[in-house]
Amino acid sequence: MNMLILVASTFLMGSSFVAGKILLQEGFPALLLVGWRFFAAALATLPLLWFEEKNPRKALFPVGMGLRGALLAKVIGLLQTAAVMGLLFLSMRSISASTAAILLFTNPLWVALLGAVFLGETLTASRMAGLVLGLAGVGFALGIGPELLAGGDTATGELIGLASSFCWAAATLITKRAALPIGVWALSFWQMLIGSLALLALAYGLGQHWPEGTTPRQWAWFAWLAIPASTGSFGLWFMALRRNGATKASGFLFLAPLFTVILSVFVLDARLSWQQAVGGVLIGLALWLVNRR
């Protein structure tokens, strides 16, 4: 059962890249798409919060949160939802869903590195080896060479995708350090709501508009992106964390880009270069080394 939950969660995570890429290719503005995605996902979280908590209002506004806690929750929302997902979807305008997924899920490597620098966490030999392999894997995934150094849309997209992973790592460390007196589902709701409102304000401020004549097929892809691939994947992931612990569950995180690659082949007719494949394997091995006990 635990394995099934982990596989289902990472499959839904992986599917979000494919759904997002399809809508981006069909003219949906990146920031507006992400903003409405997570606004809908935040609302879809409320019934789950009601099911889990006896007093949802108390869960959303816990005693002891205070001004500091509220400000930190806003920072986490701006980083975890607005920055991570906004940058991710901006990157997917010029790079494949598979590349974006590989780069985003290097997050545990940066968490381990930044945790050692800012939180004084121990870097074991296994973690050090994982970081070295992970950096090599990122190099292969990015295709570091003259073409990357020369710039261009693809190189810019890859660097933006990597920046989204750094933002995720920063949000993870802030969440860990803050130790806010709020439940997982309530924090999830606030971070998605805050991040989505920031993205929507930015998108409309830039003059972005929802495409006219949205087809039923496009609405179906958006519904999949907002509910199963967002609320569903997060809910199953939090369940996996509770059942297995962060260390064991994180070892399965690289299944998400693997599912993205597989789905991209069948749905987007995409192809993975041998450099990206090598990079993905190295990053997957690196995540296992970083998260193993």
Image (tube, rainbow, N blue to C red):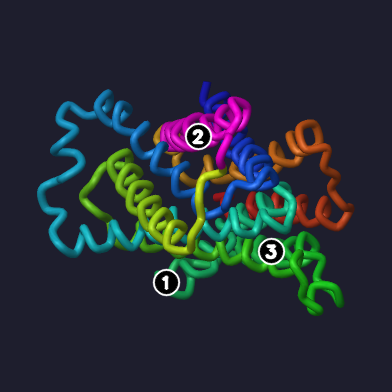
Q: Is residue 196 left or right of residue 259?
A: left
Q: Is residue 34 or residue 54 the one in the foreground?
A: 34
Q: Position of residue 152 (x, y in %)?
A: 77, 72
Circle 3 SS class: helix
Q: Which mark, residue 233?
A: 2
Q: Is residue 127 visible?
A: yes
Farthest residue to the front: give it.
212
Q: Earlier in the sequence, mark 1 or mark 3?
A: 1
- Callout 1 crowding tier (Cα within 10 Å): few <14, some 14–19, many ≥20: few
Mark drawn on residue 120: 1
* Residue 120 picture quarter: bottom left
Q: Which of pointers 2 and 3 lies earlier in the amino acid sequence?
A: 3
Can you say whether 124 is above or below 249 in the image?
below
Using the image, determine if residue 287 lies above or below residue 121: above
**149 and 10: which is toward the camera:** 149
Q: Nearer the viewer, mark 2 or mark 3?
A: 3
Question: What is the secondary structure assignment of the residue under circle 1?
Answer: loop
